[in-house]
């Protein structure tokens, strides 16, 4: 019996072709899928980066756009008239607000001067000061371009202060003080509050009469003569002496000591509010219960003090105290010469009749009476 031999299976090319075709299709499909995924990933990446960029810009813009309600002003010491030729405060973005110019300034050190109500109420904190001015008694122009402590300014705007009503308030003016000799002091000011933020030194410069006063038909010397002669009353002119300008006086006023005001009553009483104005142009004006009054602080020497208080029967009283400049400076210097690092109190003691006040600068080991201050006590109405 013959067994038929099986014939070899013919090569099935289709079986070989199908896998190849499937492989190619898979590869093509994979390539297409990969391409699609790459597109999606790229779009998502762009979106994420864009969002991150936008968020970053938003944060940056928010920081830059932080604004406060304030206006610029300027001042000069009494009997030392100045006039701003041009000045401005610049923001971080390069924009600026001008400082009122063209006014003869002599209202007093640290006092509010001309203020122009222009532009937006809300403005960024300034980062730079540019100013040119004339010192009339010196017959000199000064100019300067100064970087301001913007972090300190922003901090003061945000922190503000406690006002005489016990409520939080903040600063509303930036005051530029011009000193003989070319120095510039800058304060932030609010309702009875003033804080120095810096002092700067300008340099002498030349300004022509045509630039300073385009329509004047006078020389610069003649123009200065006319201002000094015509803009002041006789009693003021009598105290304006070009030969005895107290250079360095206002810088000396900036010296600070560690002390605090303390109010004591011979009979029961309650301090309602207190306002202290310092020789350096700073001031505070707050409710009597403000805890800051219990803390020893670095203050300049006080120029004058105003207070109001009530007695046990709810009667209201007030006082104004004006220190004699030489005496109060001598007392502070003498006290701190002996006790430099000892906390000191300016003690104001109200008598039992609410009619008189005694004043002394004292610490744990010494007390110096202040006798030359002018004191006025009065009864106030509800």
Image: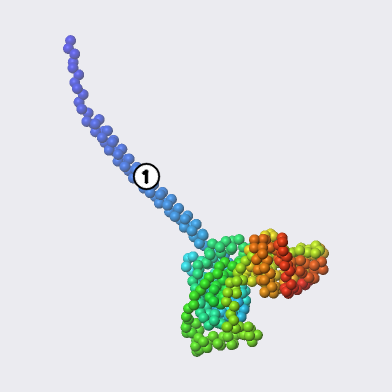
The residue that appears at 80% across and 64% down in the rendered structure is: 266
Residue at the far front: name it. 338
Where residue 75 appears, x then y in whole percent? 59, 75
Q: Is residue 258 above or below residue 227?
A: above
Where residue 41 appears, x then y in whole percent? 39, 47
Q: Is residue 85 visible?
A: no
How many numbered marks appear?
A: 1
The residue that appears at 30% across and 39% down in the rendered structure is: 27
Horizontal arrangement in the rendering, residue 49 relative to residue 177 (left or right) = left
The residue that appears at 49% across and 65% down in the rendered structure is: 92
Where residue 241 appears, x then y in whole percent? 60, 83
Horizontal arrangement in the rendering, residue 259 relative to residue 357 (left or right) = left
Residue at the far left: name it. 2
Q: List the residue tagged with mark 1.
A: 37
The picture quadrant where one finds residue 334 is bottom right
Q: Is residue 375 above or below residue 51?
A: below
Q: Which one is in front, 349 or 120?
A: 349
The residue that appears at 56% across and 68% down in the rendered structure is: 198
């Amino acid at each position: 019996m013959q067994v038929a031999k099986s014939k070899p299976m013919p090569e099935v090319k289709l079986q070989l072709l199908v896998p190849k075709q499937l492989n190619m299709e898979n590869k093509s499909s994979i390539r297409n899928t990969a391409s699609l995924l790459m597109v999606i990933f790229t779009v998502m990446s762009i979106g994420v980066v864009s969002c991150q960029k936008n968020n970053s810009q938003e944060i940056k813009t928010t920081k830059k756009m932080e604004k406060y309600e304030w206006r610029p002003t300027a001042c000069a010491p009494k009997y030392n008239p100045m006039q701003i030729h041009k000045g401005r405060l610049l923001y971080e973005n390069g924009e600026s607000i001008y400082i009122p110019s063209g006014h003869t300034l002599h209202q007093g050190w640290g006092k509010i001067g001309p203020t122009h109500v222009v532009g937006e109420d809300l403005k960024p904190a300034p980062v730079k000061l540019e100013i040119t001015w004339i010192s009339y008694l010196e017959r000199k122009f000064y100019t300067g371009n100064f970087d301001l402590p913007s972090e300190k300014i922003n901090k003061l705007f945000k922190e503000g202060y406690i006002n005489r009503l016990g409520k939080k308030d903040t600063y509303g003016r930036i005051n530029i003080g011009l000193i003989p000799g070319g120095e510039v002091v800058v304060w932030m000011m609010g309702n009875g509050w003033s804080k120095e933020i810096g002092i700067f030194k300008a340099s002498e410069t030349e300004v022509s009469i045509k630039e300073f006063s385009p329509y004047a038909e006078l020389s610069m010397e003649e123009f200065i003569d006319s201002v000094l002669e015509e803009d002041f009353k006789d009693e003021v002119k009598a105290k304006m002496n070009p030969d005895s300008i107290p250079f360095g006086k206002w810088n000396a006023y900036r010296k600070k000591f560690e002390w605090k005001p303390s109010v004591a009553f011979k009979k029961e009483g309650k301090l309602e509010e207190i306002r202290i104005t310092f020789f350096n142009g700073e001031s505070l004006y707050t409710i009597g219960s403000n805890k800051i009054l219990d803390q020893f602080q670095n203050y300049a020497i006080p120029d004058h003090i105003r207070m109001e208080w009530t007695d046990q029967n709810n009667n209201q009283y007030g006082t104004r105290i004006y220190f004699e400049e030489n005496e109060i400076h001598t007392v502070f210097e003498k006290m701190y010469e002996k006790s430099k690092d000892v906390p000191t109190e300016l003690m104001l003691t109200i008598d039992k009749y609410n009619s008189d006040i005694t004043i002394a600068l004292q610490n744990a080991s010494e007390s110096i009476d202040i006798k030359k201050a002018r004191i006025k006590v009065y009864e106030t109405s509800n």
